[in-house]
Image (cartoon, rainbow, N blue to C red):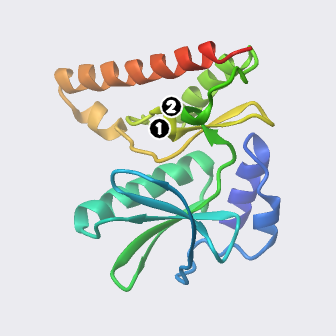
Amino acid sequence: MFNKVLNIFHHDKFSMSAALLEKNDIENKNMKLGKLIASGTEGKVYQDANNKHFYIKKPYINDSYIESKMKKQVNCFNKYYGEGSAAFIENEGIFYIRMYKVPGIPISNIDDKIFPASAQERFQHMICDLGDRGIMHVDLNFKNILYDKKTNTFYPIDFSNGHETYHSGSKNIKNSINSVSEMMYGWALKYIIEHTY
């Protein structure tokens, strides 16, 4: 597992060499929440106080629905960033996701014209990467797209995969998913264009 993660993170993604040279303790149940990074409708994301290369996601509620949803998020994270890059952990009845810290900032935090002209193509590359990995991200809002200015790369986070629902769904479900996905894609691309220098 370790080598798969190492290869993925050094291939066309970001370098995680500092984290991966240490023991890969992604499944370590010793949870120590650090600084609050973000909060959403389902939970909060914290810096891992035990390892600066990890984030920890903690939901507000711990039930079977949330457990299933979190496991699917971990599955998508591992599909996109490499096996072993995220783990679902249950500790004393509390659910967590520990995941590697993805570089960049949410595009929702970008107000200036910071994108080069090639950023539009780089964003489309991210969309293609998602499709190639069998992920149909159905919540690709501005907070779930990170941009790393240093490498001119976009990274998806907070995965929700509509792939299975889409392919097993009726024509109406497919049309609905297509419509929402195209709308979110269009909004993001327009935002990138408006913030291109």
Q: Which element is circle 1 on?
A: loop
Residue 10, horizontal then vertical, whole percent: 79, 49
Q: In which quadrant will I find the C terminus?
A: top right
Q: Do the residues labelled 1 and 2 touch (CB within 8 Å)?
A: yes
Callout 2, which amino acid? Gly
Which residue occupies the foreground of this view, 158 or 26?
Answer: 158
Residue 35, horizontal then vertical, whole percent: 59, 66
Residue 159, horizontal then vertical, whole percent: 45, 45
Which residue occupies the foreground of this view, 46 or 126?
Answer: 46
Residue 83 occupies quadrant: bottom right
Which label belongs to residue 170? none
The vertical placement of 139 against 34, above or below, is above
Callout 1, which amino acid? Gly
| 10 Å crowding of disc 1: few (<14), some (14-19), many (20+) | some
Residue at left offset 62%, top offset 49%:
81
| 10 Å crowding of disc 2: few (<14), some (14-19), many (20+) | some
Residue at left offset 76%, top offset 18%:
116
The vertical placement of 27 against 17, above or below, is below
* Residue 144 falls left or right of residue 120: left
* Residue 36 falls left or right of residue 167: right
Residue at left offset 27%, top offset 37%:
165
Which label belongs to residue 131? 2
Residue 125, horizontal then vertical, whole percent: 63, 25
Q: Which element is circle 2 on?
A: helix
The vertical placement of 141 against 90, above or below, is above
Residue assigned mark 1: 134
Q: What's the distance in space between the residues labelled 1 and 2, CA to CA?
A: 5 Å
Q: In which quadrant will I find the N terminus?
A: bottom right
